[in-house]
Image (cartoon, rainbow, N blue to C red):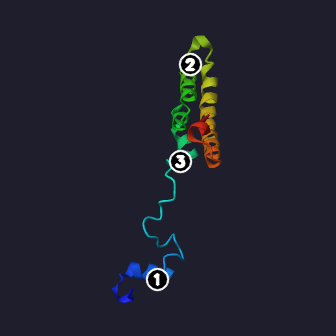
Amino acid sequence: MSIFSLSAVQWGLWHMVGESTTHNSLILQRGNAMNSVPIQPPIFFKNPTVATLLSIVTGLGQLYNGQIFKGIVFFGSMLIACFLMSPWTLFVGFIIAPVIWIWNLVDANHSAKRINQRLAAGASPVEAVQ
């Protein structure tokens, strides 16, 4: 093979591995270098900041994390706390609602971090959420 008949990219690869393709099979391989890599679905990590910001609306951070039941429970408990903000319930909701809201924010952030740790350890996405 003559150097003068190669394009710039081919010359760079030829120059790196020589005329033989056996020196570095990842740079220049006959066929596709990705043939031996098994195809896996992408793993989507959860962003703790996004989960916390979504939790400004109670339960949305848990839904983002894939914890559907927990998100519904937080939303429902916030609705109950709002109903308890009436004078005939001695305004108990004014104490309970901020506690539920802050707990919701902290839980969404910690859950996202825990899910990311489990995914990084090799757990499947379904196992990581549980």
SS type, badge 3: loop
Residue at image coords 40%, 78%: 9
Which image quarter: residue 48? top right
Q: What residue type is labelled 2?
A: Ile
Q: What residue type is labelled 1?
A: Glu
Vertical arrangement, residue 88 with respect to residue 27, above or below: above
Which image quarter: residue 89? top right
Residue at image coords 60%, 33%: 104
Q: Quadrant of the N terminus?
A: bottom left
Q: How crowded is mark 3: few (under 14 residues within 10 Å), some or many (20 or more)?
A: few
Q: Residue lying furthest top in this view?
A: 88
Is the Cβ of the residue at disc 3 closer than 8 Å to that at disc 1? Answer: no
SS type, badge 2: helix
Is the Cβ of the residue at disc 3 closer than 8 Å to that at disc 2? Answer: no
Residue 80 can be seen in this image: yes
Q: Name the residue under label 2.
A: 80
Residue 43 got which mark?
A: 3
* Distance in Å between CA atoms under marks 1 and 2: 75 Å
Residue 55 can be seen in this image: no
Q: Name the residue under label 1.
A: 19
Q: Which amino acid does label 3 sit on?
A: Ile
Vertical arrangement, residue 69 with respect to residue 47, above or below: above
Q: Which label sits in the foreground, 1 or 2?
A: 1
- Towards the viewer: 73 or 79: 73
